[in-house]
Amino acid sequence: MKKLFFVFILLLFAQGANAQLFSKEKLLNSENNDMRTLSWGYFLGFNKYTYNFDYKEQTQGDNTDVLVTGEAGFNVGLLGNLRINNYLDLRIEPGLSFTSRNFLFPGFDEESDNLREVKATYIHIPLLLKVSTKRLNNIKPFIIGGFSTSYNLASNEDHPEDNETGQFRSTEANYNYELGFGIDFYLYYFKFTPSIRGVFGMNDELVRDKNPNSAWTRNIEKMSSRGVFINFTIQ
């Protein structure tokens, strides 16, 4: 599914660039769209989350790494944009992200011990700086980056049980940095923007088991989120 998303984005970008750069048509759509100091919009999109692990020890020849597989989730939210000048915008994009990840822990024979399914519903609040190029007819490429906070509404951080009884725990509040790019397409009535962005967790999100020798968490130094967002914004 992720490959299809990338193919779709590339085709969309290529079609828009070809139409705008090589067409003789110079009529500008939504000429005043970017002139407003404050503007708003909304977005829908998809996500793919996984985790990055740092380990305390690595034993050669042994499979000690936790395997994480993620399913495609979706995003929905609002956008607030503050225009700084023709090339810089400061924006906030509060939204909800729904995702699910499966953990496979090495060294266990029983599925009830080695498999953990972790579902998450994030309130995701990024503060981003958008750096755009000069508008080319009815398109404007840009790069974007910044920092975000994610609150996991499905977090079980304070749950009294742990992996001994099948409960994998992670933190509720998490902090990330984000980098991405996209293209603004100026249509007749509004601006349509497909974009892709990487989300990189900065804090340790693992809540360790009570037993310091737990086979599930004892060898994990740090666990932090990694994600890819593909969003489609109307502004």
Image (cartoon, grey):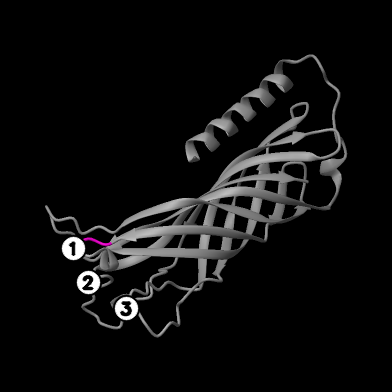
Mark 1 to mark 3: distance in Å? Answer: 17 Å
Residue 38 vertical position relative to residue 192 in the rendered view, above or below: below
Q: Which residue is mark 2?
A: 215
Residue at 50% x, 73% y is: 172
Q: Which residue is mark 3?
A: 165
For badge 2, the amino acid type reads Ala
Q: Is residue 165 magenta?
A: no
- Could you say whether the residue bearing mark 1 is in a helix, strand or loop? loop
Q: Nearer the viewer, residue 80 or 85?
A: 80
How packed mark 1 is, by other alpha carbons closer than 10 Å (few <14, some 14-19, many 20 or more), is: some
Q: Nearer the viewer, mark 1 or mark 3?
A: 3
Which residues make up the magenta segment? 105-109
Q: Which residue is mark 1?
A: 107
Residue 197 placed where, x, y %? Answer: 56, 47
Marker count (numbered): 3
Residue at 24% x, 73% y is: 218
Mark 1 to mark 2: distance in Å? Answer: 8 Å
- Could you say whether the residue bearing mark 2 is in a helix, strand or loop? loop
From this viewpoint, which residue is outermost toward the left?
A: 61
Q: Nearer the viewer, residue 192 or 135?
A: 192
Mark 3 to mark 2: distance in Å? Answer: 13 Å
How packed mark 3 is, by other alpha carbons closer than 10 Å (few <14, some 14-19, many 20 or more), is: few
Instruction: Determine whether label 1 and label 2 are within 8 Å by CB.
Output: yes
Residue 158 placed where, x, y %? Answer: 45, 82
Residue 232 placed where, x, y %? Answer: 67, 43
Residue 103 vertical position relative to residue 86 in the rendered view, above or below: below
